[in-house]
Image: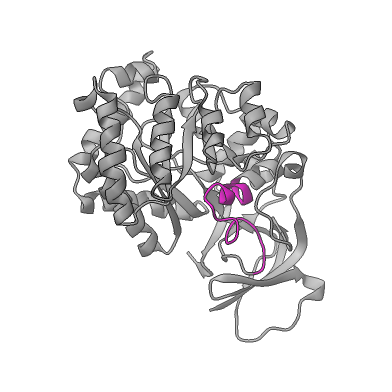
Amino acid sequence: MHLLLTNIKELLQVRKEPISKVSGTDMKTLPTIKNAWLLIKDDVIKDFGNMAEMPTFEGFRHLDCKGKIVLPSWCDSHTHLVYAGNREQEFVDRINGLTYQEIAEKGGGIVNSAKKLQQTSAEDLFNQSEIRLKEVIKQGTGAIEIKSGYGLTTEAEIKILKVARQLGKKYNITVKTTFLGAHAIPQEFKNDKDGYLDVVCNEMLPKISEENLADYIDIFCEEGYFSVDDTNRVLEAGKKYGLRPKVHVNQFNIIGGVQTGVAHNALSVDHLEVLNEDDISALKGSETMPVALPSCSYFLSIPYTPGRRLIDAGLPLALATDFNPGTTPSGNMNFVVATACIKMRLTPEEAINAATINGAYAMGLSETHGSITVGKKANLIITKKIPSYGYLPYSFGSNCIDEVILNGKIV
């Protein structure tokens, strides 16, 4: 199918020369073309330019985008979208004064979600997760990472990853899967963390690898969960199966997780609500992408990732949702972009770069997603008639999306 978009008020994130990511002061630059056209052939971007120089085309479907802005779809590099049930009672508990850690200590949190998921059939889990995926696609997400970690048994972890793969196939959306067996310690191993890590490394990993269910490996490196030594162990085990790390670090405490991730050449280190100069120094010169999850900070009322500080230090930054039942029951990347501007002091240009090209990098998708580049996937957001792209984060409570194009087709 050929699709021609014309009279585009402004075409955002135009990268004629492919790049993998943007860092530091470069994040303040968002290349655009005003009064633009864009041609899609099948599922890729074929060409684009200014309306004054548009060639004559035949055999296409025409879409007039007068007054509308077009940009690449969001690339959400950190989610737990496949989960069962919800945890609204814990939401009320936090309002009544309990901390995230206190809820976990009394059997809530990740372990609570794992119990529900273990009791949920694969079919029911798919049906629940399908609703969430359709919602985030309509909200402009064109590529998504989905982690396991709410299973905590071999059978349940495999179930999550299989459902994630099935979702990607059914909805023709790029899904990257991450094995996060070391997300929490299940009740039956409460006093035997090493025993559970034996299961993760010697039972779960081989089976997941055999069925080719994961692209990456992750661990929750945090006090009360898994230590730096545990992280080294799990990431080394993942390397044997060709799984590059994407690591949860520095959500509540600084325990050396950033340095550990960088030492293992992690594709990303995610959360980073607390940071020090040693963390920033470790990230400089590395290939590891810092990923902020501002809607998690919003929901838990914890500090926001110091994105301004990271960018001013010359580093790149990506934004993602952390969509999960306990700490971020939302996969709305539009809210993430707005919150990054409002609470983290990112400019609209920085936030859009973080949610597109840098988000693609944090999933290993720089070559196919995240920018308006010839040959990349035709995954696009067409806004309603809005005054400027700064209006997207400004109008944080409004739906500014008119159309979504996924793999060259209007959703």
Judge left or right: residue 279 versus residue 312. Answer: left
Q: Position of residue 36 (x, y in %)?
A: 74, 66
Question: In percent of the image, x 57 and y 51: which residue is there?
Answer: 360
Q: Is residue 84 visible?
A: no
Q: Is residue 301 visible?
A: yes
Judge left or right: residue 327 versus residue 32. Answer: left
Q: Position of residue 286 (x, y in %)?
A: 64, 39
Image height of 74 relative to 288, above or below: below
Image height of 125 relative to 296, above or below: below
Image height of 251 relative to 56, above or below: above
Query: Of residues 52 and 77, which is closer to you in this image?
Result: 77
Q: Position of residue 169 (x, y in %)?
A: 37, 63
| Quadrant housing residue 181 | top left
Question: In percent of the image, x 65 and y 53: which residue is there?
Answer: 20
Query: Of residues 391 and 99, which is closer to you in this image?
Result: 99
Magenta region: 355-374
Magenta run includes residue 366:
yes
Question: In percent of the image, x 73 and y 31: which residue is there?
Answer: 313
| Quadrant housing residue 221 | top left
Judge left or right: residue 302 versus residue 111. Answer: right
Image height of 125 relative to 258, above or below: below
Query: Of residues 308 and 90, which is closer to you in this image?
Result: 308
| Quadrant housing residue 370 | bottom right
Q: Count of labels shown?
A: 0
Magenta run includes residue 361:
yes
